[in-house]
Amino acid sequence: MKKYEHILIPLDGSKLAEEALEDGILIAKSTGAKVTLLRVVPPVEIILSAPGYQYFVDEQWELMRIAAIEYLTEVRKRFQKEEVEINTEVILGPATDMILVFCEKQKVDLIVMGTHGRSGVKRWMIGSVADKVSRASTCPVMLVRSHQSESVKRIA
């Protein structure tokens, strides 16, 4: 078996993305690799406001960053009994681009991520971060196909 040293598991807060966790952790455990759980928060484009309250872009980013950290901390807790080093990272930007940049800077040698497994017109119209990453990555990408419906609810 190839000796991986750093495995990236990008998570977007959905159960679909989390389906890649078990595979990624198992590979890390069997090869001695460390794992990074990465949550990419998309840029805020609209300033939110409600009667009596205004949230500016930097405040929204901070709130989303805190929510993402809390989410990743909870995910990491599920695997604390495993003998695997698991780190978490939260970054701001377009998902595909930031995953690829992170991989290059952090010397990731395997990406494990969930996918809907769409095909045909739906894939072409909707696009897929997993598809884009798998096409542009310089390291191997393992896609874990979901068996869930396409109406996956995000939790963070």
Image (cartoon, rainbow, N blue to C red):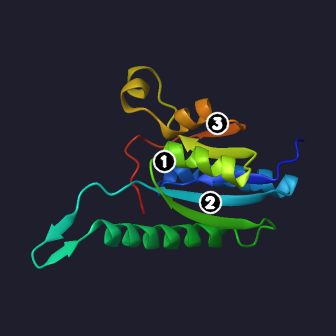
Q: Nearer the viewer, residue 152 or 128?
A: 128
In this picture, residue 88 sits left or right of residue 53: right
Spatial CA span between label 3 and label 1: 13 Å
For mark 2, what is the residue? 37
Q: CA distance from mark 3 to mark 2?
A: 17 Å
Q: Earlier in the sequence, mark 2 or mark 1?
A: 2
| Residue identifier under label 3 | 137
Label 2 amino acid?
Leu
Dot 3 or dot 2, earlier in sequence = 2
Which amino acid, by three-letter code, is at mark 3? Ser
Position of residue 117 relative to residue 59, above or below, is: above
> Mark 2: which secondary structure?
strand
Badge 1 is on which residue? 95
Q: Could you tell me which residue is drawn at 43 percent across and 32 percent down?
A: 127
Label 1: element kind? helix
Kind of residue sitting beneath label 1: Ala
Is 147 left, or right, of 81 in this rendering? left
Q: Residue at x 83, y 48 (%)?
A: 4
Assign a secondary structure to mark 3: loop
How dense is the environment of label 1, judged by Cα within 10 Å: few (below 14), some, or many (20 and up)?
many
Q: For the point 60% across and 44% down, which residue is it?
A: 100
Residue at 28% across / 54% down in the picture? Answer: 45
Q: Nearer the viewer, mark 2 or mark 1?
A: 1
Residue 130 appears at what percent x and percent y? Answer: 54, 38
